[in-house]
């Protein structure tokens, strides 16, 4: 395994650990890993039309 691969693996571990520890602001919110960041996604609107 190359040094670059080890660095990427370490970054992923840090990101995953942070994602697991995210304190979401309320019911229905979710945290998603997008590229190299954690994005908080709000709940869908209550009055949706299908």
Image: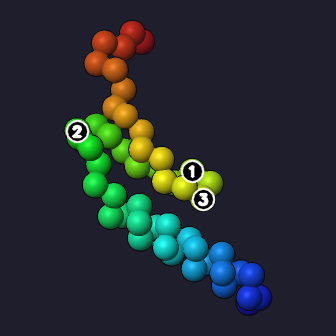
Quick one: 49 or 28, which is closer to the camera? 28
Residue 46 placement, left or right of 5: left
Check disc 1: other Cα within 10 Å, few if <14, some if 14-19, many if 20+: few
What residue is shown at x 66% (from left), y 84% (from top)?
Answer: 6
State the quadrant of the N terminus. bottom right
State the quadrant of the C terminus. top left
What residue is shown at x 42% (from left), y 44% (from top)?
Answer: 40
**SS for tag 2?**
loop
Q: Looking at the picture, how far across and down is residue 14, in whole percent? A: 49, 73
Closer to the chain start, of discs 2 and 1, is 2
Read off the residue under disc 2.
27
What residue is shown at x 58% (from left), y 73% (from top)?
Answer: 11
Q: CA distance from mark 1 to mark 3?
A: 6 Å
| Above or below 17: residue 30 | above
Read off the residue under disc 3.
36
Closer to the chain start, of discs 3 and 2, is 2
Residue 49 placement, left or right of 39: left
Q: Quadrant of residue 9?
A: bottom right
The extreme left residue here reads 27
Q: Looking at the picture, how far across and down is residue 27, in whole percent? A: 22, 38
Disc sitting over residue 34 in the figure = 1
**SS for tag 1?**
strand
What residue is shown at x 36% (from left), y 44% (from top)?
Answer: 30
Disc sitting over residue 26 in the figure = none
Residue 7 placement, left or right of 27: right
Q: Nearer the viewer, mark 3 or mark 2?
A: 3
| Above or below 46: residue 16 | below
């Amino acid at each position: 395994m190359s040094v670059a691969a080890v660095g990427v693996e370490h970054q992923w571990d840090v990101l995953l650990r942070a994602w697991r520890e995210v304190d979401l602001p309320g019911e229905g919110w979710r945290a998603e890993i997008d590229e190299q960041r954690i994005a908080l996604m709000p709940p869908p609107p209550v009055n949706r039309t299908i």
